[in-house]
Amino acid sequence: VESSIPEHMREAWRKYSPQGFKTKDEFEGEVVRHIETTLARSLFNCDELAAYSGTSLAFRDRLIIDWNKTQQRQTFADQKRIYYLSLEFLMGRALDNAMLNVGLKGVAKEGLEDLGFRVEDIISQEHDAALGNGGLGRLAACFLDSLASLNYPAWGYGLRYRYGIFKQEIENGYQVEIPDYWLDFNPWEFPRHDVTVDVQFYGWVNKYTDDEGKQVVSWQDGELVTATAYDAPVPGYGTPTVNNLRLWSSKASSGEFDFSKFNSGEYESAVADQQRAETISAVLYPNDNLERGKELRLKQQYFWCAASLHDIVRRFKKTGRTWDEFPDQVAIQLNDTHPTLAIVELQRILIDKEGLEWPKAWDIVTKTFGYTNHTVLPEALEKWSVPLIQNLLPRHLQLIYEINLYFLQQVERRFPKDRDLLSRVSIIEESTPKMVRMAYLAIVGSHKVNGVAELHSDLIKTTIFKDFVTVYGPDKFTNVTNGITPRRWLHQANPRLSELIASKLGGYDFLKDLTLLNKLEPFIDDKDFKKEWAEIKYANKVRLAQHILKTTGVSVNPKALFDVQVKRIHEYKRQQLNIFGVIHRYITLKGLSAEERKKVAPRVSIFGGKAAPGYWMAKTIIHLINKVGEVINNDPEIGDALKVIFLEDYNVSKAEIIVPASDISEHISTAGTEASGTSNMKFVLNGGLVIGTLDGANIEITREIGEQNIFLFGNLSEDVEDLRHHHFYGNYQVDSELQKVFDLIKSGKFGDESAFGALIAAITEHGDYYLVSDDFDSYRKTQDLIDETFKNQEEWVTKSITSVARMGFFTSDRCINEYADTIWNIEPLAVADEKEA
Ligand code: TH1
């Protein structure tokens, strides 16, 4: 490996190369040093935030030493790397994760005690890195954890948003959005002011023949924006591998462009240009499963794709290999269609800059890319208008048309005279204005397309991508069922459960091979074990009850059944079905005598999740939940029998408190709408049971844990279309039990009924697209069954333990190994000194 320091002068480097702390004393020394020098504080003004900062810097030093070695090792090994392109990385907090992965949380706990702090208080000082909306962003974060833990040479590429997902507050029952400015002090990032890329926008395409008679294409006179790299270390668990997450930040280019303005005295407008450039990486778009076609979003996408591709190509070129080796060195995975422009950008580099012939370049491109689809919802499928792309990226539009031409010619050769097929698979939709169908471009430019759960992967083959199965055959389409990292979602979020499991399994190996959990099954009749299992769940519920009291002022009974639905608020996820069910339960309870009421299993219905700021229906659902809560929680007749809680600002670190504390969680999307879902996996792995529809990964969870351990209800995906056709528009009669719920809402019991009219009208007047009326009866009856089952705690705990024992399949390690084997064709890089966890 090339080095900037000549061999005979490296002695001093080797002598002083830092090792990082290992013992408690060394840890304390590092923390104090950072607090007093890096932060310029002292023991006289060291608050918890300063202690958090000092602790983080000490751990960061350790990680960065391993990070450097990992990067050197990977460069030296020179094997294929995987680049994961995602507009979202929902990382949550880093410190706790770093402590556990390095294996020194115990040392930190004792060291912090010596210094006058409690480790939990220090950990909770950290602001979540919330650079994502929900499942898609959190999946990317779990993947990074698995890639590092399995020693794959891997990089994540994303945007360094100044504002992550907004912070949610509830005022008078309404969602209010507060900007999430999270970068004030972030010890986990390394600015790389020497790693920059100039990215071009606008301009025009100049085609000419040069002196040697060669065709030259030049995209010129555009506006330049500079991308600066910010790196965050991604530590693996129980391994010295520390991979890199590289996030790009935008600022005006320091190139010729703005200088002219400064010189001609247009100072203010030069500053305005600067700010306009910085806008590109300013804010995460807060829509989950919705695409709105805004120009700034397209700018974000290209800015990030161009910078990342440039970086990847630069690294490849250093190896001195020839271009046909590119796909043997580089795999790029597209997290949904958001990075599809990377396909066009690589083709542009190969054609316009490197002078390759089209077929050769395109062969390299398609061998390099893989595309993951995460949704079939039509409103989430990206389409960009041709005039918009023409203006912003004129050269790319030409290339897209050329890609389409070659593709359609290929289709025509195989299916002559099928003009309908040609227009159906065309990357360009012939509408006004014309639109570029990004998913089609992603399919054509990739060698594999995968869905994220079995049902979903089948659905894309028979619905939205049907014609592409005709064109390419079925083998281009595959399934990789999602997974979650057991490090964060079991070991970190639920340390007592992890410890109990380790005590039975003889160590923590299960955190690296989750299938070992099946060794719990023999303990299913072990009385003491079951008792401890139940106690841990109870303790987690007590902790959540304290959090609820502190944040909402409502006191809930930890002995009650905790029924949780936390996820983005969306009509297809059907929080409205849940709250209608709660209202029905309230009506039933009100009809009982005080004696009878004492016999029902008390329940706490817990909701959490953000609505996209422009999604009015979702906001109405939040409003209804809060108003229903106000009424029920203050009804003296009801007492502990029913409480309804809306938890503000659901995010990753709150999930770490909520998930281990649930008895039942709700995954009740209309069948065929939730591609996978991943929180379903987190809840079951923590010993919670599930009420769910036959949708997404629920189906595979059922197959693994057994039908007797999950509460399934509702219509099947294959019947959804038919059922929709049977709904009447205008004055559709729902069954009498659901009608009672509507009547109570309309009576004004929960406040101004006109506020909630739209939720009812969606069902009775507008075709009930999400089949709430069709599934309500089955939902209610299943909830009654849950009440009955919960009364038998013995049986309940058996289901809980059995389920956890059978969850091994859903680790993101399995998922990443499948991607590596079937899509990326990459191998882990062996590490000599694997650490014991
Ligand atoms: C989610 C899916 O809704 C969910 O079912 C799945 O488990 C998760 O991805 C991970 O695969 C999606 N999130 C988004 C976000 C955007 C656009 C599409 C999807 S699909 C912005």
Image (cartoon, rainbow, N blue to C red):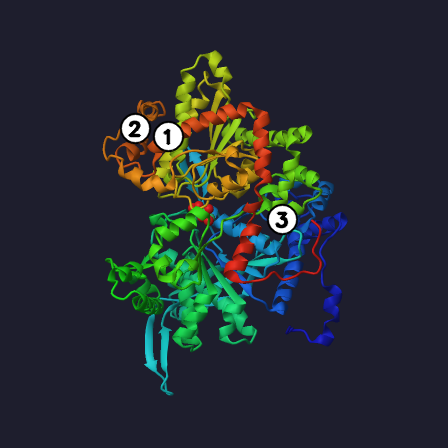
Identify the residue at horizontal 38%, vertical 51% (top origin).
460
Identify the residue at horizontal 31%, vertical 69% (top origin).
413
- Image spot of residue 235 (x, y percent): 62, 54
Identify the residue at horizontal 24%, vertical 65% (top origin).
417
Label number found at residue 40: none
- Asked whether disc 1 touches disc 2, contact meaning CB atoms under 8 Å apart, the reply is yes
Label number found at residue 734: 2
Q: Quadrant of the N terminus?
A: bottom right
Q: Secondary structure at mark 1?
A: helix
Image quadrant where residue 362 sits:
bottom left
Please say if 810 is above or below 11: above
Q: Secondary structure at mark 2?
A: loop
Label number found at residue 776: 1
- Asked whether disc 3 touches disc 2, contact meaning CB atoms under 8 Å apart, the reply is no
Please say if 109 is above or below 316: above
Q: Which sits earlier in the primary sequence, circle 3 or circle 1? A: 3
